[in-house]
Image: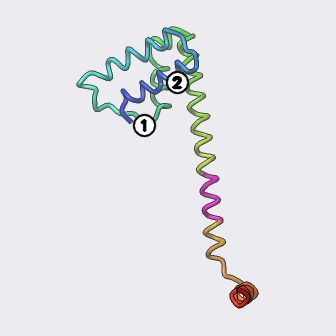
Amino acid sequence: MNVSEGLQRIRERLLDNGARRETVALVDAIAKRAALPAAQQASAQSLLQLARMLQRSPVATNNIDVYNDLLRLEEDLEAAGAAYRERMAAEERIADAAAREASDPKSRQYYKQQKEKKRGA
């Protein structure tokens, strides 16, 4: 993910959470530096990684309110990630069960019932 895009999404989430002006100003300042030509190629693995980097900034370490806003954002991102992983695991279990059911050998009784259905139809 491009850092500039990630910071923009973080800014939106912070505004949705009702973050303080100082927190949004921090994100804006970092986004301004990320928009410079030398930093255009910067990338991050996730929004969570960016949020943790912001928490380690001097502004966040010197201002507990900014740190708390970023901590709340980190918790939201972790919860969203956990919900996504649970949803993907549930879908995988359903797909595995369907594949197992399709590959299970059918009983002789099953094939007899299928044959009778064709005759009756």
Q: Secondary structure at mark 1?
A: loop
Using the image as rendered, state which of residue 98 and residue 54 is in the foreground.
Answer: 98
In this picture, residue 60 sits left or right of residue 92: left
Report the amino acid beneath label 1.
Gln
Image coords of residue 18 (percent x, y): 57, 15
Number of callouts in the render? 2
Q: Quadrant of residue 64?
A: top right
Residue range in magenta is 89-97
What residue is drawn where x is 60% and y is 57%? 92
Nearest to the eye among marks 2 and 1: give it: 2
What residue is drawn where x is 47% and y is 31%? 47
What residue is drawn where x is 58% and y is 50%? 88
Q: Secondary structure at mark 2?
A: helix
Image coords of residue 63 (percent x, y): 52, 8
Q: Is residue 94 magenta?
A: yes
How has the structure been colored for display? rainbow
Using the image as rendered, state which of residue 110 and residue 78 is in the foreground.
Answer: 110
Q: Is residue 8 above or below residue 64?
A: below
Report the amino acid beneath label 2.
Arg
What residue is drawn where x is 42% and y is 37%? 45
Residue 88: which numbered mark, if any?
none
Looking at the figure, which quarter contains the N terminus? top left
* Residue annotated with mark 1: 45
Q: Is residue 105 above or below residue 25?
A: below
* Residue annotated with mark 2: 13
Looking at the figure, which quarter contains the C terminus? bottom right
Image coords of residue 89 (percent x, y): 61, 52
Using the image as rendered, state which of residue 62 and residue 75 is in the foreground.
Answer: 75
Comes first in the chain, label 2 or label 1? 2
